[in-house]
Image (cartoon, rainbow, N blue to C red):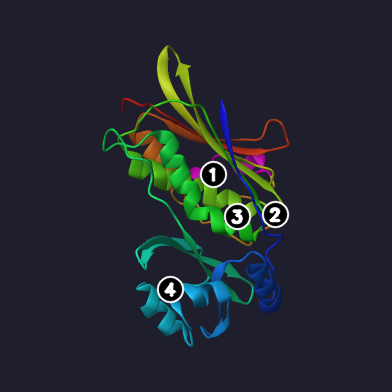
């Protein structure tokens, strides 16, 4: 069994621009901080080396070739800077957002146009790694070394992204999240069992089914844990011979499971 650990070098996410600047500088990150008023508050030397001086947010958008959009929502986009493939991540915090660039490398060549499910998981993790680092969350990929592929991989990536996004929202700074997959048998048929587990708060018993319903409205600031966008995950699972559910039997971890028929 292969466990791929992603080291988290950053200490914590801060509610102040001054502290966030120190975190980004200490990490050697190529990053800028944009305030609530969309003005540039801070630019690391690493980012200046990469793209030069950044006087305004508009200039940053033009240099990167992408709109920054809603700074209150985390997002990641792949761009090219000086012939290097870079991942631009927007990481919101209390007084604005950190715009972080990191170099990414092409995935290994696939023997078919359909990627391995393990590579789908890793691509999802890459979208959220910057946010996890800034929140000092330990993010682990746990997957058996097997060659299973899944032809609806784009929809799978969206579903896993929703589950991971929810975990990262609820896990406190310094927490842990594990995302992975296991090939299994169910009633004599092969299945793929994906999971996202974390040590954040548990979903209350009375909400375990409600959060997957189409009419459920997520309140991100509510005291109890629920989740956003989970109906779409349920729709995807149902359309492909599977199901999704949340479990916390151990009372130590909140675990979301996504079961799929690999042949569906």
Which numbered mark, 4 or 1, is in the foreground of this view? 4
Give the structural element (helix, strand or loop) at label 4: loop
Give the structural element (helix, strand or loop) at label 2: loop
Q: Tags 3 and 2 in contact by the CB under 8 Å rule?
A: no
On the image, which quarter does residue 190 sit in?
Answer: top left
Residue placed farthest to the left in the image? 113
Q: CA distance from mark 1 to mark 2?
A: 24 Å
Which numbered mark, 4 or 2, is in the foreground of this view? 4
Residue 210 in magenta? yes
**Magenta residues (range):** 202-213
Residue 34 seen in this snapshot: yes
Q: Earlier in the sequence, mark 1 or mark 3?
A: 3
Disc marking residue 132: 3
Q: Earlier in the sequence, mark 3 or mark 2?
A: 3
At x 73%, y 35%, the residue is 251
Residue placed farthest to the top in the image? 188
**Residue under pointer 4:** 68
Q: Is 119 or 95 nearer to us in this picture?
A: 119
Q: Is 230 or 216 nearer to us in this picture?
A: 230
Q: CA distance from mark 3 to mark 2?
A: 10 Å
Q: CA distance from mark 4 to mark 2?
A: 26 Å
Q: Position of residue 252 (x, y in %)?
A: 73, 37
Question: What quarter of the picture does the C terminus occupy?
Answer: top left
Disc marking residue 210: 1
At x 42%, y 39%, the residue is 119
Horizontally, is 246 left or right of 115 in the view? right
Disc marking residue 172: 2
Residue 230 seen in this snapshot: no
Residue placed farthest to the bottom in the image? 55
Q: CA distance from mark 4 to mark 1?
A: 34 Å
Q: Position of residue 20 (x, y in %)?
A: 66, 72
């Amino acid at each position: 069994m292969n466990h791929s650990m992603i080291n988290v070098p950053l200490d914590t996410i801060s509610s102040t621009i001054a502290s966030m600047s120190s975190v980004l500088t200490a990490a050697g990150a190529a990053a800028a901080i944009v305030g609530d008023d969309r003005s540039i508050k801070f630019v690391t030397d690493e980012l200046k080396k990469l793209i030069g001086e950044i006087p305004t947010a508009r200039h940053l958008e033009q240099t990167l070739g992408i709109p920054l959009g809603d700074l209150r929502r985390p997002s990641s986009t792949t761009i090219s800077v000086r012939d290097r493939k870079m991942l631009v991540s927007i990481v919101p915090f209390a007084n604005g957002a950190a715009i972080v660039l990191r170099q990414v490398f092409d995935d290994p060549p696939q023997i078919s146009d359909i990627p391995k499910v393990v590579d789908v998981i890793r691509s999802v993790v890459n979208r959220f790694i910057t946010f996890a680092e800034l929140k000092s969350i330990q993010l682990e990929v746990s997957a058996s070394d097997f060659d299973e592929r899944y032809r609806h991989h784009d929809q799978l990536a969206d579903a896993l992204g929703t589950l991971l996004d929810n975990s990262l929202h609820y896990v406190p700074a310094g927490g842990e999240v594990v995302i992975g997959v296991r090939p299994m048998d169910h009633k004599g048929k092969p299945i793929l069992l994906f999971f996202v587990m974390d040590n954040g708060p548990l979903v209350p018993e009375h909400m375990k089914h409600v959060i997957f319903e189409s009419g459920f409205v997520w309140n991100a600031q509510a005291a109890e844990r629920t989740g956003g966008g989970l109906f779409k995950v349920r729709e995807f699972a149902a359309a492909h011979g599977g199901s999704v559910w949340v479990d916390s039997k151990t009372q130590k971890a909140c675990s979301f499971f996504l079961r799929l028929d690999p042949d569906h």
